[in-house]
Image (cartoon, grey):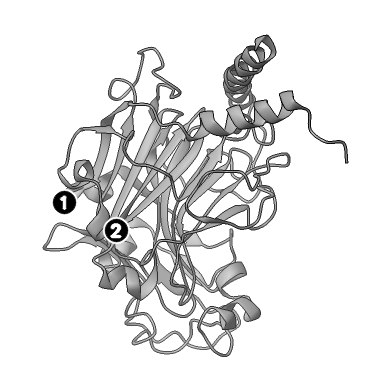
Amino acid sequence: MIPPSPLRRSLALALAMAATLTPAVGYNLSRDYSGANFFDGWDYYGSWDNLTLSEVWWLNQTEATAEHLAYVNEAGKAIIRVDNTTNVPVSQDPRRNTIRITSKDSYDYGSLWVFDATHLPYGCSVWPAFWTKGPLWPDDGEIDIVEGINLMSSNQMAIHTLDGCTTNKNIVQSGSLGFTNCSAGAGCTVHENKANSFGEGFANAGGGVWATQFDVAGVFIWFWSRPDVPAALTQNQTTIDISSWGTPSASYPVSPDCPITKYFTPQQLVIDIALCGDWAGVDSIYQSSGCSGTCGVTGPGSPAYDNAWFEINYVRAYTTGAVPTATASPSGSTSTATVTSTASGSGRTTQPQQNQSSGTRRAARSAGALGLLGAMLGLLLLA
């Protein structure tokens, strides 16, 4: 192997430092999904899981309301749950009812998403997630903010892209780096090292908060258990300054190994609960994550699914620009954001089609990110 030149080492160091700097940037509240109107801003999937092949039927809104699987409780918190009242008979294709919802709005670069929950679904076969996707999945990128299976006690974060994006071990983050090929099945994974980020421990600690920065500089995810949540996120402030948040749990900075803007278009937010499927239901994984035997959803719903529910205080989307469409100049290393509404639909598709306009947007953003890298390289060459 040829030793890296001093210039190359300097460039790598400069990129790493730039990616971890958090300038004082104000994010303005754009959408607040909370209280009695929580579910107004979402579309329901209304189909079987043709994506991860889990043993569920994701209900439509009418069904979800009738079966009391998606509602706002007396405390004003959103509940999303698995059916735990039905005895599902053994059959060739058993399925249990649950929920998947996708935000009507899409959020561009320059966005910050905050997810505050007091309870996450857990239990054998249970696979909950709070994540994002582009309009054409998987072409337009995916960010997994909250995800775990079965009796796992810690959260796993990830990004998923098309071929060409990788992460490296020099990233500054508090979580533990897992897989580094973002186009592989698991994506580029990071395991949370802070306590009480999933499962029973999360519930016993009173829950917690995740914040995700989606920017031309990269994707960055923070987690705080309930006692450590920043004051700005507990006081319902409409403007958030992230400069004091410190090291993220997961960092995916723009780099030559992964020019973020090449792989991500505006993202929709998704909340769902799957059961079994191609992660939680794999025998070896099922058994190594606290469960015995093989994964299945048949039989009585209780007590198996008594803990399979979200209790959500709020989901909030912030942008660096005006609400809802930003027109101001970029500030620091962040970009301005555009919030757009999308037509109702089930979102993720198994056979994504080409989209010329999304390719044009991606090329424009890639040029901006590469321009930033080029400017940094130029400074190093002049030094």
Question: Which quarter of the rendering shows the C terminus?
Answer: top right
Q: Earlier in the sequence, mark 1 or mark 2?
A: 1
> Mark 2 highlights which residue?
208
Residue 375 location, x and y as percent? 61, 14
Q: Which mark is residue 358?
A: none
Please state, as top left, top right, bottom left or bottom right, where the N terminus lies in the image.
top right
Residue in view at x 62 percent, y 35 percent: 263
CB-based contact (under 8 Å), mark 1 and mark 2: no
Mark 2 surroundings within 10 Å by alpha-carbon count, few (fewer than 14), some (14 through 19), many (20 or more): many
Q: Which amino acid is tagged 1?
A: Ala
Residue occupying the far top of the picture: 382
Alpha carbon of mark 1 to alpha carbon of mark 2: how far? Answer: 21 Å
Q: Is residue 209 visible in the rendered structure shown here?
A: yes
Q: Is residue 140 above or below residue 284?
A: above
Q: Residue furthest right?
A: 1
What percent of the width, then of the height, locates residue 69? 30, 67
**Would residue 196 be found to the left or right of residue 66 on screen?**
right
Relative to 274, is 16 above or below?
above
Mark 2: secondary structure? strand
Q: Which residue is mark 1?
A: 36
Q: Is residue 60 left or right of residue 158?
A: left
Q: Position of residue 21 (x, y in %)?
A: 45, 31
Quadrant housing residue 62 = bottom left
Residue 347 in view (yes/no): no
158 lies above or below 18: below
Which amino acid lies under the numbered mark 2 shown in the image of this protein?
Gly
Outermost residue toward the left?
Answer: 74
Q: Closest to the observer: 115 or 94?
A: 115
Q: How many marks?
A: 2
- The residue shown at (33%, 33%) is 243
Q: Position of residue 346 (x, y in %)?
A: 48, 49
Q: Nearer the viewer, residue 74 or 242?
A: 242
